[in-house]
Amino acid sequence: MALPMPDLGRLRVANLADVPRIALVAAAASRKDYYHEYMHPHMEVHPADHLAGWRQTITSRVQNPNYVVLVAEDQFDGEEASKVTPALRAVYPSKNEQFPTPVTQAGKVVVAFATLCLAPGSPRYGQFNLDGNTSRGTTEVLQNRARDPSSDEVINRLLVPAVMAHIRGHAHLDGLYTHPEYARRGHGTELLRWVVALAMSDSFTVMVVASQTGRVFLQMRRFRFPLRVALPGFRPSKLCLVWFGAGGISEGNTVRHIVRNVDDATPLDFYNVYGERIP
Ligand SMILES: CC(C)(COP(=O)(O)OP(=O)(O)OC[C@H]1O[C@@H](n2cnc3c(N)ncnc32)[C@H](O)[C@@H]1OP(=O)(O)O)[C@@H](O)C(=O)NCCC(=O)NCCS
């Protein structure tokens, strides 16, 4: 029997039919996310690749038994494309391409989502995997020309392994996005409320890698930022590592561990909360 989970309220767990819409929400919102921009500096030049890349990522998350992909819905606004960049607007998918058939109940569509990687060994493994562990994957893509291979290398070969080596045993919130048309209506807060409630009930800590927009939002919601990372050649060159709660990890140890785990040859510079460089 499935373990009880925090009340979803107006949220729901995503399924594969939601993928095209979630990917669009992500592409629309990620222009504000410097962390994403660092890895995808050419998203304005190759918006279709960017969108397809998101479809691929979201598909893998929805299919992964160790993930929960949660969505928030709102009344569809036919003018929503006016809130995205001109590049994305030029390849904005039609309603038919975005929404499952039949179209959503009462004209509501996905406007925000969160992706949470469960802590390894979580008894909830598979609980949120509505379509089963299919290995269907996407057939599209991809040589994703929106992505920069060298920044991808910095993040995925240097930084993420160092962080992951430490956060074993903790959950990782690796996506929280609201389509700009539907921002400031409480959707982000609602999604985070559920993630935090799950963390409280299962006694784990949530780790997040966030950029400036996310930092302000999360800091207001009791997340702390013990470590910042400057990415080579990038403005505003601050990436924040964050975690929530007191689930058995100490800030000082975590910071030391992550810094130590990054290869000496790395071009990454680390700073503490006071903006002082950590040697
Ligand atoms: C961060 C993000 C997810 C917030 O989404 P959101 O749905 O706009 O979030 P909310 O509406 O819950 O809160 C945003 C603000 O709107 C305010 N707000 C909430 N409900 C509101 C309402 N009904 N009317 C007016 N304002 C409202 C909140 O007080 C909040 O202000 P604060 O940040 O100063 O506290 C969104 O800005 C985003 O997608 N950013 C880019 C990606 C990113 O940085 N993600 C987070 C890190 S992983």
Image (tube, helix red, strand yellow):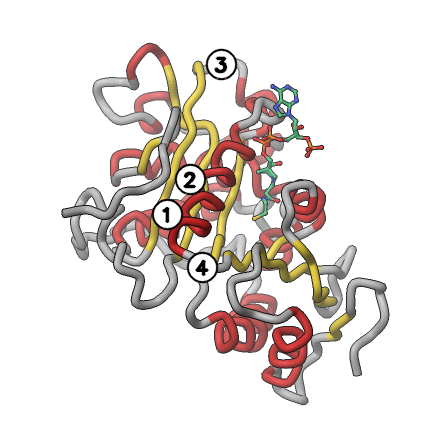
Q: Are marks 1 and 2 in contact (CB under 8 Å)?
A: yes
CA separation, marks 1 and 4?
24 Å
Residue at disc 1, secondary structure: helix
172 or 56: nearer the eye?
Answer: 172
The mark that comes first in sequence, 1 or 3, is: 1
Measure the C-alpha gap from mark 1 to mark 3. 23 Å
Label 2 CB-ligand 1 distance < 8 A: no
Chain-order first, disc 2 or disc 3: 2
Give the answer, above or below, for where 209 lies relative to 25: below
Q: Please state which amino acid type lies under the numbered disc 3.
A: Asp
Pointers 3 and 4 in contact (CB under 8 A)?
Answer: no
- Residue at 49% x, 77% y is 165
Marks 3 and 4, Cα distance to the nearest angstrom?
Answer: 37 Å
Q: List the residue tagged with mark 2.
A: 23
* Residue closest to the eye, 219 or 117: 219
Crowd band around label 2 with a 10 angstrom C-alpha radius: few (<14), some (14–19), many (20+):
many
Residue annotated with mark 4: 204
Q: Earlier in the sequence, mark 1 or mark 2?
A: 2
